[in-house]
C-alpha cells in the first residue's frame, strides 16, 4: 500500500517535491482541456472553519475542472462542530471521499486529521501557515520573472501565516527573503532557528521597510489584521509606517513585482496606486490559486501519474 500524500506545510516537503508541484501547476495551466478527467470519479471534501473566497472557489472549481466532485462542509453542517473528535471525523471521511482540504485555526487540527485519515489531507490555511497560497505566489513570480532561486523578495508588515510560508519557500527553493516587521510582530525564534538549521535560502530580519525593499525583485504584504486578531486598532497604529505605497515601491528594482494574497484593505497596508499599478500581479496571483491547487490535488491523489 502506497504512503498517503498529505500537503500540510511547505517545510514538510523537500525541495524536489515543491518544484514538482510548481512544474505540474504550469503544465496543467497550459493545457486545461488535456487534464479535465485526471480526477474523474474522485471526491474532495472541503472543510471551512474560517471564511473563504479564493480558497473555496479555486479548490471547488479546480476539482470539477479535473473531472472530480466536491462536498463543502461548514461547522454547523458537521458533528465536528458538536463535539465529535477530529480523529473520528477523519476516520469517517476516509470511508466516503478521496481527499480533504481543511481551512481552520490551529495547525494541530490539520495534523490530527492527517494522523487519523487514510486519505490525503490538504492544509488550506491555519493561523500558523498558508502553504496553498504560497504555491500560487511562487508560480506567479516564476511566470513573470523565471526561476526564483537566488532572487530576493521583501515581506512588509506583520510576519503572519503567509509570511511564515514564504520563509518555508525561501529555504526550500534557495532564495532570500527580507522580513521588515515591527519587533512585536516579527518572526518567531523557532522559525528563524528552523531556517538556519536547514542551511538553504537566506532570511533577513529588519525593522525598516525602506531598507528591506531596496533593489528587491518582489514586494509582498498582507492585511494588518488576520481573521483571528482582535487588536485591530492597535495593529493599524503600529503597522502604519509599513504601508506599501508608491514611494516605497520606487526603492525596489524597477521591474519589481507587487504581491498580496487578498483580500486587501485598500489604502491601509497598500495604496490603490500600487495594487492597481504597473508592478502589481495580484490578479495573476489570485488566478494561479486555481492552477496551483489543481496541481496539489493531482500530486496528492495520483502519485506520479502526471
Image (cartoon, rainbow, N blue to C red):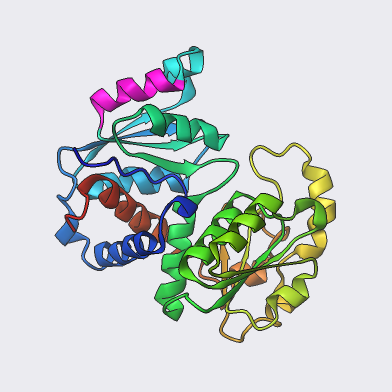
Residue 200's place in the image compared with 14, above or below, is: below
Instruction: Report the front residue among 191 and 38.
Output: 191
Q: Position of residue 215 (x, y in %)?
A: 65, 83
Residue 11's place in the image compared with 24, above or below, is: above
Q: Position of residue 228 (x, y in %)?
A: 66, 37
Q: Which residues are magenta?
A: 86-97
In the shown orientation, is residue 64 left or right of residue 134?
A: left
In the shown orientation, is residue 147 left or right of residue 251?
A: left
Q: Residue at x 37, y 27 (%)?
A: 116
Q: Position of residue 269 (x, y in %)?
A: 71, 59
- Dividing the picture into quarters, in which one does residue 239 lie? bottom right
The single residue placed furthest to the top in the displayed view is 83
Q: Report if residue 138 lies within the magenta region.
A: no
In the shown orientation, is residue 294 left or right of residue 226?
A: left
Instruction: Report the front residue among 271 and 50.
Output: 50
Q: Main secondary structure of the magenta part?
A: helix
Q: Quadrant of the N terminus?
A: top left
Evaluate whether residue 207 shows in this view.
yes
The single residue placed furthest to the bottom in the displayed view is 254
Evaluate whether residue 188 shows in this view.
no
Q: Residue at x 71, y 82 (%)?
A: 251
Residue 141's place in the image compared with 87, above or below, is: below
Q: Report if residue 91 lies within the magenta region.
A: yes
Amino acid at each position: 500500500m502506497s504512503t498517503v500524500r498529505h500537503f500540510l506545510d511547505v517545510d514538510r516537503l523537500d525541495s524536489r517535491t515543491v518544484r514538482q508541484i510548481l512544474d505540474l501547476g504550469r503544465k496543467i495551466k497550459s493545457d486545461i482541456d488535456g487534464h479535465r478527467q485526471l480526477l474523474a470519479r474522485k471526491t474532495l471534501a472541503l472543510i471551512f472553519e474560517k471564511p473563504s473566497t479564493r480558497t473555496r472557489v479555486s479548490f471547488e472549481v479546480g476539482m470539477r475542472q479535473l473531472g472530480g466532485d466536491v462536498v463543502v462542509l461548514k461547522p454547523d453542517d458537521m458533528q465536528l462542530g458538536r463535539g465529535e473528535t477530529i480523529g473520528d471525523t477523519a476516520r469517517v471521511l476516509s470511508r466516503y471521499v478521496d481527499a480533504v482540504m481543511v481551512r481552520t485555526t490551529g495547525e494541530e487540527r490539520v495534523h490530527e486529521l492527517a494522523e487519523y485519515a487514510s486519505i490525503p489531507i490538504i492544509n488550506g490555511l491555519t493561523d500558523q501557515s498558508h502553504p496553498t497560497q504560497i504555491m500560487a505566489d511562487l508560480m506567479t513570480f516564476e511566470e513573470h520573472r523565471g526561476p526564483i532561486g537566488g532572487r530576493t523578495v521583501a515581506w512588509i508588515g506583520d510576519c503572519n501565516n503567509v509570511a511564515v510560508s514564504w520563509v518555508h519557500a525561501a529555504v526550500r527553493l534557495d532564495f532570500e527573503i527580507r522580513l521588515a516587521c515591527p519587533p512585536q510582530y516579527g518572526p518567531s525564534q523557532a522559525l528563524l532557528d528552523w531556517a538556519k538549521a536547514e542551511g538553504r535560502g537566506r532570511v533577513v530580519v529588519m525593522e525598516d521597510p525602506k531598507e528591506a525593499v531596496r533593489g528587491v525583485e518582489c514586494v509582498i504584504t498582507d492585511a494588518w489584521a488576520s481573521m483571528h486578531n482582535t487588536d485591530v486598532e492597535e495593529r493599524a497604529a503600529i503597522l502604519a509606517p509599513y504601508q506599501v505605497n508608491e514611494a516605497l515601491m520606487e526603492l525596489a528594482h524597477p521591474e519589481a513585482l507587487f504581491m498580496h494574497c487578498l483580500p486587501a484593505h485598500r489604502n491601509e497596508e497598500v495604496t490603490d496606486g500600487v495594487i492597481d499599478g504597473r508592478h502589481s500581479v495580484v490578479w495573476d496571483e489570485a488566478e494561479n490559486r486555481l492552477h496551483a491547487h489543481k496541481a496539489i490535488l493531482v500530486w496528492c491523489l495520483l502519485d506520479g501519474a502526471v
